[in-house]
Image (cartoon, helix red, strand yellow):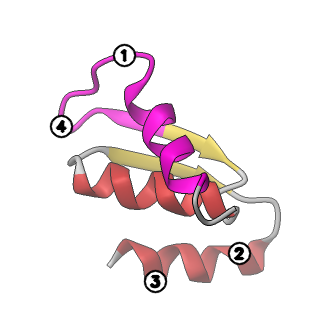
Amino acid sequence: MLGINPITAYCLLHGYTKLAPGAWIAQTGATAATARYVAALAKHAGLRALHAVRREHSVTPLLSWRA
């Protein structure tokens, strides 16, 4: 899965529409492997992101990825 997740994340961000820096994206299941790649690529592209998680304890890892 390591080989396909980055490609999937890239396609999710760039395969449907052109997102300008500062645009917002939202995703559910934000602690999944592909979602982590989406978050990293979005940050690199200058996008803002809203990440939804199911469990409260999942918030801490998301905050550490933000830095």
Residue displayed at 46% across by 83% down: 64
Q: What is the distance, in whole Å, between disc 3 and disc 1 at their CAs?
A: 28 Å
Residue at the spot of label 2: 58
Between disc 4 and disc 1, the foreground one is 1
Disc 1 designates what residue?
17
Place of residue 19 in the rendered image (x, y in percent of width and height, measured from the top left) = 28, 26
Residue that extends furthest to the right in the rendered view of this protein: 55
Classify 10 Å Cα crowding around label 3: few (below 14), some (14-19), many (20 and above): few
Q: CA distance from mark 4 to mark 1?
A: 13 Å
* Rendered residue at 28%/44% (across/down): 47
Estimate the spatial distance between the alpha carbons at disc 2 and disc 1, rounded to whole Å: 29 Å
Left or right: 65, with 52 as reference point: left
**Disc 4 vs disc 2: which is toward the camera?**
4
**Dot 3 or dot 1, earlier in sequence:** 1
Give amino acid for label 2: Ser
Q: Earlier in the sequence, mark 4 or mark 3?
A: 4
Q: Quadrant of the C terminus?
A: bottom left
**Picture quadrant of residue 60:** bottom right
Q: Which mark is residue 64?
A: 3
> Does residue 9 belong to the magenta stretch?
yes
Helix, strand or loop at disc 4? loop
Q: Are marks 4 and 3 in contact (CB under 8 Å)?
A: no
Quarter of the figure with the N terminus: bottom right
**Where does the magenta region start and end?**
4-25
User: 56 or 31, which lies in front?
Assistant: 31
* Secondary element at image label 3: helix
